[in-house]
Image (cartoon, rainbow, N blue to C red):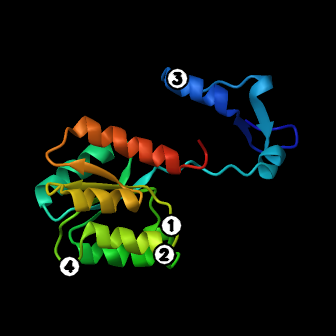
Amino acid sequence: LRSRAGGPRAFCGTCRAQAFAVGKVPTPHRANLMSSAILARIRVEPRRRPRALLAEDDPFLRRLVARTLARDGIDVIEVASGTELVAHIGRLLDGDPTAAVDMILTDVRMPGSSGLDALEILRRSNETIPVLIMTAFSDVETRAQAQRLGAHLLDKPFDIADLRNLMWAGITSADPGT
């Protein structure tokens, strides 16, 4: 379609979404057409998918959690050790846009560095990214330290539905658009 000035036209988001929801190609009607001049003045940024950083040294659990979160529409960055987690957090704190995440999910005991050590580094820099800590070693000290640092502790073995609910609650609380 062309506008009277000869430029391309677009459909409003509501009509496009309704048409695609029922599996049809959107059809134009006069009220839903916008000229390219109007579109040029409107800056619309596409909504990106939430991103989570997953640090787990057990490859089977890491793969299971990553696939579950990916099915829920969360992009997952996987790291296999505490050393990799600390390096990723360092890039995040340096402002690397490829390291940006909405949520961190980490094991407590991993090779190189613990999840709690990485969390301390994150909190010392005043970052408020939600953190969910998974552990099979839930002693009183670990719980107290996790709570002091503002993280939620999830005991292994855990129900995958509990993990999903906690992840979405953390991502939603970190999202300034909600």
- Mark 4 or 3, closer to the camera: 4
Q: Amino acid at mark 4?
A: Gly
Q: Amino acid at mark 3?
A: Lys
Q: Would you name the residue on which mark 1 appears?
A: 127
Q: Is residue 149 visible?
A: yes
The Cα atoms of the two marked residues, 2 and 4, are separated by 20 Å
Answer with the quarter of the image where residue 117 lies: bottom left
The Cα atoms of the two marked residues, 2 and 1, are separated by 8 Å
Q: Residue at x 88, y 43 (%)?
A: 5
Task: Check residue 112 in the rendering and tell me which mark sits there, or answer none.
Answer: 4
Q: Is residue 71 left or right of residue 56?
A: right
Q: Is residue 22 left or right of residue 11?
A: left
Q: Residue at x 61, y 30 (%)?
A: 16
Q: Is residue 125 left or right of residue 160?
A: right
Image marks 2 and 1: residues in contact by CB distance under 8 Å: yes
Answer with the quarter of the image where residue 168 lies: top left
Which element type, helix, strand or loop, lies under badge 2? helix
The Cα atoms of the two marked residues, 4 and 1, are separated by 22 Å
Locate the N terminus and report the quarter of the image it occupies: top right
Q: Position of residue 88 (x, y in %)?
A: 37, 74
Labels 2 and 1: the sequence-earlier one: 2
Task: Check residue 24 in the rendering and tell me which mark sits there, or answer none.
Answer: 3
Q: Nearer the viewer, residue 39 or 88?
A: 88
Q: Amino acid at mark 1?
A: Glu
Which element type, helix, strand or loop, lies under badge 3? loop
Labels 4 and 1: the sequence-earlier one: 4
Labels 4 and 3: the sequence-earlier one: 3
Image marks 3 and 1: residues in contact by CB distance under 8 Å: no
Task: Check residue 93 in the rendering and tell me which mark sits there, or answer none.
Answer: 2
